[in-house]
Image (cartoon, rainbow, N blue to C red):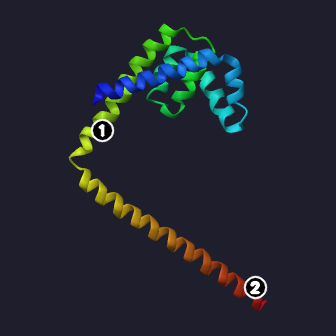
Amino acid sequence: MALLAYLGAVVGDQAGYAIGRIGGAPLLARLARAPARAAVLARARRLVDRHGGVGVFFSTWAVAPLGPWVNFAAGATGLAWARFAIWDALGEVIWVALYVGLGFLFASRIEFLASLMGNLSGLLAALAVAAGAALWIRAALRARVGKRR
């Protein structure tokens, strides 16, 4: 299972790099048209520009949500493929080990965790209802006090 997860992660990252390499700066410009994507792409590009392969390494697990954008940016900015591939492969070892390890660790406790999450979601729903009721009561009291004046 871990090997398949690792291969899938590395192949996906390589595809992102290849798309960035083929699309280049025009692809980054097109992706950056939306303000939210522009901000994420700017962070990814800064990471690649400042740290190169080490930035790729950390984007695979430490700042994983930024990872796909770093892959595009690394390809588009011309980071050498060998450098990208080595740092990516090393980073994915950590990412896969963390997630597969957590899965292995918690697999025997899945029923307990499901029960806990069910109780937690019930508690959160009750708190949301209580907060809504408190806001409604507060607004009603303020309206009543305002009418008396």
Q: Is residue 49 visible?
A: no
Residue 96 coordinates in the image, percent (x, y): 35, 29
The circle drawn on residue 86 is none
Of the image marks 1 and 2, the number of the one nearer the N terminus: 1
Q: Which residue is drawn at 34% across and 29% down?
A: 5
Query: From mark 1 to mark 2, how far is it between C-alphas?
Result: 56 Å
Three-letter code, disc 1? Leu
Above or below residue 110? Residue 61 is above
Three-letter code, disc 2? Gly
Circle 2 SS class: helix
Residue 88 coordinates in the image, percent (x, y): 44, 18
Circle 1 SS class: helix
Considering depth in this image, is 8 or 45 the residue closer to the camera?
8
The extreme bottom residue here reads 148
Q: Residue at x 29, y 54 (%)?
A: 113
Considering depth in this image, is 143 or 117 the residue closer to the camera?
117
Residue 83 coordinates in the image, percent (x, y): 49, 9
The extreme right residue here reads 149
Mark 1 or 2, which is nearer the eye?
1
State how many labels appear. Answer: 2
Q: In which quarter of the image is residue 95?
A: top left
Residue picked out by circle 2: 146
The extreme left residue here reads 108
Q: In this view, does 93 lie to the left or right of 15?
A: left
Q: Do the residues labelled 1 and 2 touch (CB within 8 Å)?
A: no
Residue picked out by circle 1: 102
**Classed neighbour count for the residue bearing mark 1: other residues with Cα under 10 Å, few (<14), some (14–19), many (≥20):** few
Q: Quadrant of residue 31?
A: top right
**Which quadrant, please, contains the C terminus?**
bottom right
Residue 39 coordinates in the image, percent (x, y): 67, 33
Q: Residue at x 48, y 32 (%)?
A: 64
Q: Can residue 44 be seen in this view?
A: yes
